[in-house]
């Protein structure tokens, strides 16, 4: 049964949620780059090995993009979004508290898994919660924030690393994940409702 979307707050709240999710996924592609020397020095790994902090996120994120989309066809949208944001946030905490390089890599791989879900969720959530006449605007918001967050990553990572150390580039994800989860909990439907009518 198709259900109309009537509340502006719910519709745009869902856009805010997936936009914040896209910022999380995009930011972590690049924010770590400036922190790599500090990670290597602190955890006693070579510069070449430290590069795996970048690859450990990127590889699962890319590899799981299509499988994530297929899984989301079957999953409840709100539960999937909350899983993705909570998983991304907890992975960030794991990395920030990691005593060794192996745990950093494990956390980054988990971030990549949940990042692939965040990326795949944007279009179906917008399709579920935004009327057809507003979908182009909603998608443009998300698609603009993704590259902007990636572009801002190195500058933000440099500021955080210099001021608070390399672990802060992962802790910054926590308030973003909490904000995204809160917006998603309030605005993304519990079950798939079909596309809103024109």
Image (tube, grey):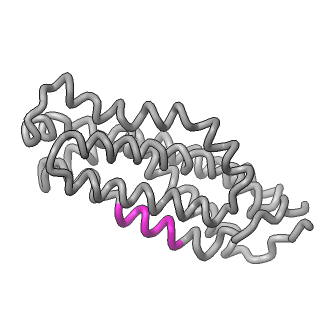
The magenta-colored residue range is 174-182
- Residue 17 rendering spot, x and y as whole percentages: 56, 63
Instruction: Name the one closer to the observer, 63 or 141.
Output: 63
- Numbered disc total: 0
In the drawing, does residue 109 fall left or right of residue 48? right
The residue under the point 51% across, 50% down is 22
Predominant SS along the magenta part:
helix
Q: In this view, does 85 lie above or below 7?
A: above
Point out residue 93 in the picture as x, y percentages from the top left corner: 29, 59
Vertical order, 63 against 70 (above or below)? above
Picture quarter with the C terminus: bottom right
Farthest top residue in view = 48
For the point 61% across and 45% down, the residue is 120
x and y percentages locating residue 141 in the rendered image: 60, 52
Comparing 63 with 20, the one in front is 63
Q: In which quarter of the image is the N terminus?
A: bottom right
Q: Give the residue at x 20% y 51%.
A: 98
């Amino acid at each position: 049964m198709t259900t109309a979307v009537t509340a502006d707050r719910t519709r745009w709240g869902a856009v805010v949620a997936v936009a914040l999710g896209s910022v999380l996924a995009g930011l972590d592609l690049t924010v770590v780059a400036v922190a790599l020397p500090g990670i290597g020095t602190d955890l006693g790994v070579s510069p070449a090995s430290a590069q795996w902090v970048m690859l450990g996120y990127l590889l699962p994120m890319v590899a799981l993009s299509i499988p994530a989309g297929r899984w989301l066809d079957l999953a409840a949208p709100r539960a999937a979004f909350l899983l993705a944001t909570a998983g991304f946030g907890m992975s960030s905490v794991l990395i920030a508290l990691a005593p060794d390089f192996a745990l950093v890599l494990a956390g980054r791989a988990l971030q990549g898994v949940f990042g692939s879900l965040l990326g795949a969720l944007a279009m179906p959530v917008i399709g579920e919660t935004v009327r057809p006449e507003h979908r182009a605007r909603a998608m443009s918001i998300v698609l603009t924030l993704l590259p902007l967050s990636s572009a801002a990553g190195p500058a933000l990572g440099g500021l955080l690393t210099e001021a608070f150390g390399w672990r802060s580039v992962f802790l910054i994800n926590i308030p973003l994940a909490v904000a995204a989860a809160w917006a998603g909990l309030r605005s993304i439907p519990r079950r798939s409702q079909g596309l809103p009518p024109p």
